[in-house]
Amino acid sequence: MPRWNPDGEVLMLLQIHEPGETPEPHALERSQAIGIDLGTTNSVVAMVSGDHPEVLRDGSGDGLVPSVVAYVYDEPIVGRAAQAELAQHPDLVISSVKRLMGRGAADVKTLAGALPYQIAPDPDGKAGGMVRLKVGDRVLSPVEISADILKALKQRAEISLGHKVEKAVITVPAYFDDAARTATKDAARVAGLEVLRLVNEPTAAALAYGLDSAAEGIYAVYDLGGGTFDISLLKLQKGVFQVLATGGDAQLGGDDFDHALASWAMRRTGITGLTSGEAKILLQAARAAKERLTTAPGAELKAKVAGHDVRQSIDRGTFEVLIEPLIGRTLRACRQVLEDAKLTPADVKGVVLVGGSTRVPLVRAFVADFFKQEPLADIDPDEVVAVGAALQAKALTQGSETLLLDVIPLSLGIETMGGIVEKVIERNTPIPVTKAQDFTTYQDGQTGMLIHIVQGERETVDACRSLGRFELKGIPGMVAGAARIRVTFAVDADGLLTVSAEERMTGVKAEIAVKPSYGLSDEQMADMLRDSLTYAREDMEKRLLLESRVEAERVLLALKAALAADGALLSSAEHAEIDRVAQKLKGLVAGDDRARIHAGMEELDRATHDFAQKRMDRAIQAALKGQRLDEVEAGMAPDNPN
């Protein structure tokens, strides 16, 4: 179990046997768990038999289950059989639903025209609810559709093992936010699976290699799939897997290779203005040619579109010229992640390849040149993530000396006065983790505080993503700054967040489990990271300006309270002069010149100096009222022990 110090820092992380004690030998069958890679295009299920992990395959030896569901009959059809229904029932077949996990209807409005989904209206008429899809006469959520895929994977495992399976480790993209992770766990629950742990996909891939070879050192996981690219750096030491940094490009993948090849064919043949259906046909032909070029020096792209028979021969060299700029983008992301971790390519002991697009020879050549070593490719890149999940599933049910430390992908914090973000947990912090920070009240007599939780790297709330809000009530009415409110962020091993707040004097508490109804897309998360670098200087200048405004407003509030209490100490001329300078400062606060705001505060400080002195004199006189001089002198004299 974990131990915590008084400041909320993790001292010792979870033992790998959790959740639950190591089972007795006779209970191993009952506790046996599987590993699942729930993918956008394909899904894979694996398990560990003895000490050897294996992918569970169908009768023809195929380990991949296409993440496609057809709702043609009473019972859903999953996988290749669902793909076969596409030609006859395109409106009843759903694919790539992972892109919608944890997202709301408002999130997909801009995508609906590009995605093969019909968005159903919200039955409750509430904005921000979970997106729902109209599939024939059914209305289904991404959670329900993902659950059908998980049921098919569970069934494959039960057929292979000959007994029921109720527990699983499921992998998720490193950039999946809290909402998407929660949606994944919900889908598993609907499918009848208890999720022992959600593991980031790059971490699972490294786990597959690390446990097999007892590797130690720093490893890079280069994950190039069909639609996204992720790069992660992990430190492997004495059975501990710690993620040091993650990054990538959520708008880059093997699909872009297909588009580049299809565009080349269109230019060569002079074809323009394809319909969406014709474009799909051409892209399918381009993908087939790309796959042939993986092993052959040349290939032919063949398709019938727009009344033309397209037949274009292409050699591997020409194809590589087309895709070289795309691969270059992945290397820029690799360079950025190394900079985040303060490492160089020479510090990396090994590179693990994940994703079908890493089969492209030029990708492997570029990766080898960048890291100055041949990448590891012993395990099928389409299956390595599921293998790692299966190893983690065994560790959590049967015990292991391995400890897995993942990280949060984006910083977590709260909104403070002026719309400024105060980060409580920085991105790339290992999880599970608990951190606490003290805050205070802004106004005299304040008895409540609204806690607004945000996620992102920017300095202001409007540039970050809102996760949730809750209110701490019952704060004792004190002068501004006297109350001490401790806000604690706790992120569990699945990356799910709980936030609590406590007023330290009274013990008044409030708490929220952050479960937003929709989440960020991979693209939005990648954009947030890029924007934090692009606008770093601009953000900091904006933050400093907002802090100056907040400080000036605090000074003006304090002055207002002082004038209300002791304004009689001033002559009319003195009062007018202070009012004039205060009004001038109010005008400066509305502007964007931080230096002038500071100058205005200094001018107000000078204008109120005599007023402050008069208030102090009055306070001293009130404190001494009724005391004799010898009593005052006695109170000021040092104690005499004799």
Image (cartoon, grey):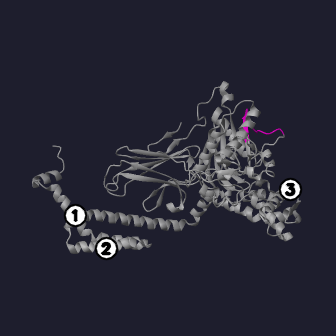
- Residue 28 image point, x, y percent: 67, 28
Mark 3 sits on what residue? Answer: 292
Q: CA distance from mark 1 to mark 2?
A: 18 Å
At label 2, which amino acid type do we have? Val
- Residue 476 image point, x, y percent: 32, 49
Q: Is residue 581 above or below residue 356?
A: below
Where are the magenta residues, as a range?
Answer: 45-59
Along the line of sight, the residue nearer the viewer: 80 or 447: 80
Q: Earlier in the sequence, mark 1 or mark 2?
A: 1
Q: Quadrant of the N terminus?
A: top right
Let me know if residue 46 is in the magenta part: yes
- 23 relative to 267 in the view: left or right: left
At label 1, which amino acid type do we have? Asp
- Label 2 crowding class (10 Å Cα cut-off): few <14, some 14-19, many 20+? some
Residue occupying image coordinates x 77% and y 64%: 324
Q: Is residue 45 visible?
A: yes
Mark 2 sits on what residue? Answer: 581
Q: Earlier in the sequence, mark 2 or mark 3?
A: 3
For label 1, the SS is: helix
Determine contact: label 2, label 3, CB under 8 Å. no
